[in-house]
Amino acid sequence: MTEKQILIDWIHRVEFKLDDGKWVEKKRLPSLVTEIYFNKYLARQKELNLPEKLSFGWMYKNKSKYSKDRIWFKFSEGGANGEVSRQFVNMIRSANKEDEFFLVESEVSTLRGVPDIRWKVTELTFKSNGALGHHFSKKAEEYQGEIKGGVEAALELRVPLKVGQKIGNWLNSECLSDLKRLFSQRCLMNFSKLFLSDIDAVGLSEAGSIEVLEFKRKDPATGFRYVANHRRNEPYGIDLYISRVYAFKCMGSSFKVEFGDSSRWIGRQDDCFGLDISHAKNVELCTRAGINYRYIVWNSDKSEPFELLTKCWSPKVPLDMFIMDVTSNSFDGLSLTNGDDSGSYTEETRYQVMIPVASFTPISIPS
């Protein structure tokens, strides 16, 4: 096998997990294709009017379960778009002063037929001249060890694994360096045991403003959403829904009892696009930090790459897009989904806050 073939094979392997002694796909492979398409092609479409300068590879974890303070990890782009990262870190720190930031670099070798990743983690801090620098620290060393140990154990477990090439036709067109980056990033997300969430892109507009971009390929949710009846002493906006979710998770309330309380919830049924609570928390943070949060939806009920794109990355039909600048007050209801249905780390119920489709701006992009 060539080095490219080895990497493509292993990119598939790392998206499988053991379930009752059997290897099963985590349903993430199709999303990898649409994410690559967004990063390399769709984000550059003039119809979307997105920032020209984009930075990818931002991930984070909360310092504790209910804390707003975060630990951020930036997967290195090799020095590209440093100004985007500098301004992003500066604005996040203005809202979350206790947040910490780390740079993750990787070097992939496939000499033995099994990819070997050399990790390097350094802490990001501002220099006296205002530039964003990075240096070794005790915390960075600890994270580096955690990542190395978790990834090595997971890859060793997958050495005998044989899987198909579900998205091989699309990955074949990627260059070797991009495949190495994708492989390392998926290992970091899946096996570091840091339980990271990611941000699709951070952009710097011509006017000099920072934007966070969230991209999804989905079709509208058509089931019931539950709109919160605001009560005295409760917060507003996204904080209202987050506090409600925390409350009935802590109390162990059943969904039927909770949402059947008409004094607390109003059931509605119309077309909406949702955001997981973890992403909605990003909206809340961006609102406090003065960062624009832009939600971009490729409206399609197709999910498999062969239904959406040719092997040359051309869309098979014109793109039906929806776009919206989201704030903490944009949400109008809550819905539930099973975590395993959407590639989550666990099978726990996931909560989504909903935005009516009518609130978005529709955009059509020719195929």
Image (cartoon, grey):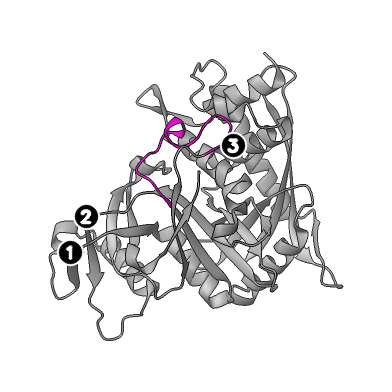
Q: Identify the residue at the far bottom of this view.
A: 232
Q: Nearer the viewer, residue 124 or 268?
A: 268
Is most of the magenta stretch helix, strand or loop?
A: loop
Q: Which residue is mark 3?
A: 187
- Looking at marks 1 and 3 on the same chain, the residue that comes earlier in the sequence is marked by 3
Please tell me which residue is depicted at 40% across the width and 65% down the height of the picture.
360
Q: Which residue lies at the image location 50% right of the left edge and 16% below the top edge?
A: 162
Residue 214: x, y in percent?
A: 51, 57
Q: What segment is highlighted magenta in the picture?
A: 298-314
Using residue 240 as the reference point, say whether residue 161 is left or right of it: right
Q: Give the quadrant of residue 116.
A: top right
Looking at the image, residue 215 lies above or below residue 236: above
Q: Nearer the viewer, residue 364 or 94?
A: 364
Q: Earlier in the sequence, mark 1 or mark 2?
A: 2
Confirm or deny contact between disc 1 and disc 2 (CB under 8 A).
Answer: no
View extreme (front): residue: 366
Between marks 1 and 2 in the image, the one whose residue lies nearer the viewer: 2
- For the N terminus, give its image quadrant: top right
Disc 2 element = loop
Question: Compared with residue 234, is residue 126 higher up or lower down, i.e. above or below?
Answer: above
Residue where numbered disc 2 is placed: 223
Residue 311 falls inside the magenta stretch = yes
Dot 1 surroundings within 10 Å: few (below 14), some, or many (20 or more)?
A: some
Asked if residue 327 is positioned above or below residue 111 in the image, the reply reads below
Residue 298 visible, this orientation = yes
Q: Quick one: SS at disc 3?
A: helix
Q: Residue at x 37, y 76 (%)?
A: 237
The amino acid type of the residue labelled 3 equals Cys
For residue 66, say whether it is visible.
Answer: no
The residue beneath circle 1 is 259
| Helix, strand or loop under label 1 | helix
